Image (cartoon, helix red, strand yellow):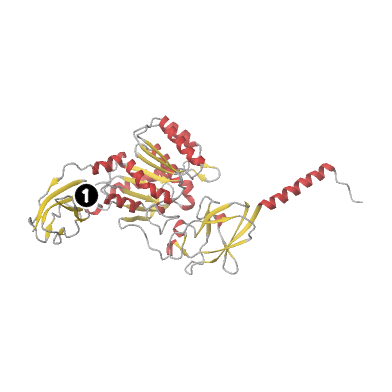
Amino acid sequence: MPPKIKTHTMKKLIIILIALFTFSGIFSQVTFVINAVPDYTPPEDIIYLAGSLNSWNPDAADYAFTKNDNDNYIFDISGQPQGTTIEFKFTRGSWATVEKGIDGEEIPNRQFTIGNTDTVYFTVHNWADNSGGESTASCNVSIIDNDFYIPQLNRTRRIWLYVPPNYEESNEHYPVIYMHDGQNLFDAYTSFSGEWEVDETLNQLADDGYKVPIVIGIDNGGGERLNEYSPWVNAEYGGGQGDDYMDFIINTLKPFVDENYRTLPDRENTGIMGSSMGGLVSHYGGLAHQNIFSKIGIFSPSYWFSDTIWTFTEETGKQDAMKIYQLIGGEEGNAAVENMWAMQTTLNNIGFDGDEVFSLEVSGSEHNEQFWREQFAPAYLWLFSTYVNGVNQIEKPIEIQVTPNPVVDKIAINGSKFGLNDSLKIINMNGVEVMNSTIGKSHIINVKQLPIGNYILIIVSNGKKFQGKFVKK
């Protein structure tokens, strides 16, 4: 006769069985299989999953694929509740090697909802570092160094440089904005999820007559991004290297930039800007070093990363006049929105008034590059309003002599006074614009096509307006 099982023991077994049954019904395992990659993929390279499961780390060892006997790449996801939707992309260890589309174009994040599916198959069409896609960076964007040494962290990093369109043709000095996540600022070819189009935006502002700055873009460190973008440690995600990263910007990178480019190096003309974790480190770096920065652009800040951000802000206080621009999307989550408005209150409480802090919540907008791209120009114009408006407020034009006058075919412009890209307009006596161009290399303006009559020639150069009258024969 089998032994009796005590009642309390039986109850424990039933509870355990119910728990096991419940667990197996809620959590699932799914295998991701990449069964097609570009022919040029180096066989020795490791493919990683980077996404919402691992804070978008492009080379997390726990998210590396392994190869099976068929040379397919295999990765198992387990422990995720059914119904969980994850976003992700595939990389070969960095955002410089993130996957791209068939024609080398940027592709949206992949999405997958955990369910009863056992195996899911994927195709990678291209990699960013050999996709056949073309760079979208403007001609006035360049790379200072692909391996700029960071002595404070014993690492190297790619550093980008944007200079104003008239930089080469002028002797002017410019403000500087230091920006994080450099991969995403200027070039869709290197971007993680689309670029900010900082270069196109500033070039358009320059065309519209605004003064634009030098921008220095600092690539993030991939797997080191979270570590470098916070001075405080998050038990789950890392952090703690933010002071070293800021020390690099202030004591290594900025002196190099000021020595080699025509900058306005004082605090009044130095800004720092970034999004997400880049917004967090911009907030921290700008406030911690108010003797260096006077302008901070904080897009979709990750204030959630550490509660210490609040005590740091209160204890640091206002040390000098600042301009602080905060931005959040209405679809970024209630906590993110509430944190931004709470931070505005905190900043006001420590002495920054309404003219120094501008906070904007944009309904319907999400946490992505498209949102930050759309908002970059307004943020820049507000942060640097004194600089850009001072240039645009052209009062009395400087009279210049137009030769020959009267003119039949061509006008000669004094090349020593104007740059190649300085804007040139000609209007008739009714105020109608009949020509709009730039000075150009030859400094010769062909007016043969103009009807006989009187005209005004207008040139804008280095914030000054020049005007001359001529007669067309």
Of residues 141 and 108, the one drawn nearer to the viewer in this rendering: 108
Name the side, left or right, on which 461 lies relative to 403.
Answer: right
Please give left or right for residue 66 compared with residue 466 in the image.
Answer: right
Q: Dot 1 corresponds to which residue?
A: 171
Residue found at x 46% / y 56%: 95
**Residue at image x 41%, y 31%?**
348
Q: Position of residue 61 (x, y in %)?
A: 55, 55
- Residue 421 percent coordinates (x, y): 22, 55
Instruction: Return the x and y of residue 217 as percentages of the image width and height.
Output: 37, 50
Q: Is residue 348 above or below residue 40?
A: above
From the viewer's perspective, is 352 left or right of 11?
left
Foreground residue among 454 and 169: 454
Kindly identify the residue that appears in the image at 52 percent across and 61 percent down: 47
**Which x, y percent locates residue 273?**
38, 44
Q: Is residue 28 left or right of residue 101?
A: right
Secondary element under disc 1, as helix, strand or loop, is loop
